[in-house]
Image (cartoon, rainbow, N blue to C red):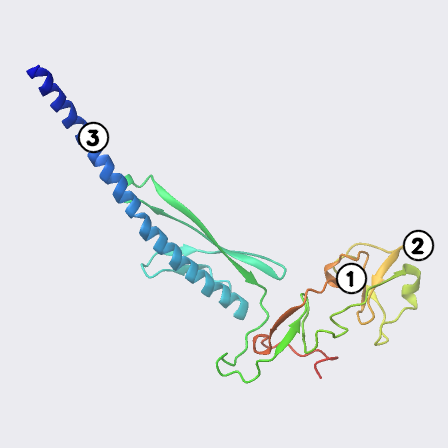
């Protein structure tokens, strides 16, 4: 029995020599996740700054640098009026060796560049609200402006030769939906009273109007609408 007790004590010592280091290795590895979370917050802050720079000055900066000196590359995926700024980075956990690291991908939505007001927000005198169309190049003072509400009409292609818009202008093919398409007699197209293009589909982006309400101080150098902004 005496020799059996010695064997038990010896086995406990061997188990402890294996388990205890593994336990502390796991604890310190979990604690190291806090710096990873801190870096995520810094990256997100820099992504916000990069997005504002793009929306205000149309500058797609290629990288960001954190307070720690680490540098991360940025990828810009812009499609039309909206896009996303992506930062993919990794951070190794030293206690587990260089072969083990945390991979993180962070994204920041961005809008299309529309210009930046040179008047600081805190000193801007005109903070009234105006309206912007999704594909518009002017701002509107009235949400009921006829330029925002297109009044789409469907007519036959034969009438395009004689049809005129409210300004007396002729209708030309839309650069979006009519590219490489020739209309023929018997085919219907879509026009608007104040537009100067005809469309082969009512779903064309040139006919859509998603209206946003924004402060006038945020429209930058966009001119007012010639109809409601006078």
Above or below, 125 relative to 132: below
Residue drawn 26% across and 42% down?
A: 27
Q: Secondary structure at mark 1?
A: loop
Question: Mark 1 highlights which residue?
Answer: 174
Q: Secondary structure at mark 2?
A: loop
Residue drawn 39% across and 58% down?
A: 41
Q: Secondary structure at mark 3?
A: helix
C-alpha distance separating marks 2 and 1: 19 Å
Above or below, 180 relative to 167: above
**Label 3 neighbour load within 10 Å: few <14, some 14-19, many 20+:** few
Kindly indicate whether the residue at mark 1 contacts the one at mark 2 (C-beta within 8 angstroms): no
| Label placed on residue 186 | 2
Q: Nearer the viewer, residue 101 or 217?
A: 217
| Label placed on residue 18 | 3
C-alpha distance separating marks 3 and 1: 74 Å
N-terminal label among 3 and 1: 3
Q: Quadrant of the N terminus?
A: top left
- In the rendered image, which quarter is residue 128 located in? bottom right
Residue drawn 52% across and 79% down?
A: 118
Residue 185, how many percent across, how many down? 93, 56
Residue 94, how many percent across, how many down? 28, 44
Residue 11, how many percent across, how many down? 16, 23
Residue 158, how many percent across, how many down? 93, 61
Above or below, 118 relative to 7: below
How many marks are shown on the rendered structure? Answer: 3
**Label 2 neighbour load within 10 Å: few <14, some 14-19, many 20+:** few
C-alpha distance separating marks 2 and 3: 85 Å
């Amino acid at each position: 029995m005496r020799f059996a007790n010695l064997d038990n004590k010896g086995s406990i010592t061997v188990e402890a020599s294996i388990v205890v280091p593994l336990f502390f290795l796991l604890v310190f590895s979990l604690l190291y996740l806090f710096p990873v979370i801190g870096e995520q917050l810094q990256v997100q802050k820099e992504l916000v700054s990069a997005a504002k720079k793009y929306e205000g000055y149309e500058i797609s900066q290629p990288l960001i640098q954190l307070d720690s000196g680490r540098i991360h590359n940025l990828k810009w995926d812009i499609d039309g009026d909206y896009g996303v700024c992506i930062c993919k980075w990794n951070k190794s956990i030293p206690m587990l060796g260089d072969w083990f690291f945390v991979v993180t991908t962070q994204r920041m939505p961005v809008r299309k560049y529309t210009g930046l007001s040179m008047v600081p927000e805190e000193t801007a005198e005109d903070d009234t609200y105006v309206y912007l169309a999704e594909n518009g190049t002017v701002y509107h003072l009235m949400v009921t402006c006829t330029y925002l509400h297109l009044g789409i009409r469907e007519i036959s292609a034969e009438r395009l030769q004689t049809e005129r818009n409210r300004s007396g202008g002729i209708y030309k093919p839309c650069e979006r939906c009519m590219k490489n398409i020739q209309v023929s007699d018997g085919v219907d197209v879509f026009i608007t009273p104040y537009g100067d293009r005809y469309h082969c589909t009512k779903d064309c982006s040139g006919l859509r109007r998603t209206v946003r309400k924004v402060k006038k101080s945020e429209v930058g150098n966009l001119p007012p609408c010639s109809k409601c902004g006078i």
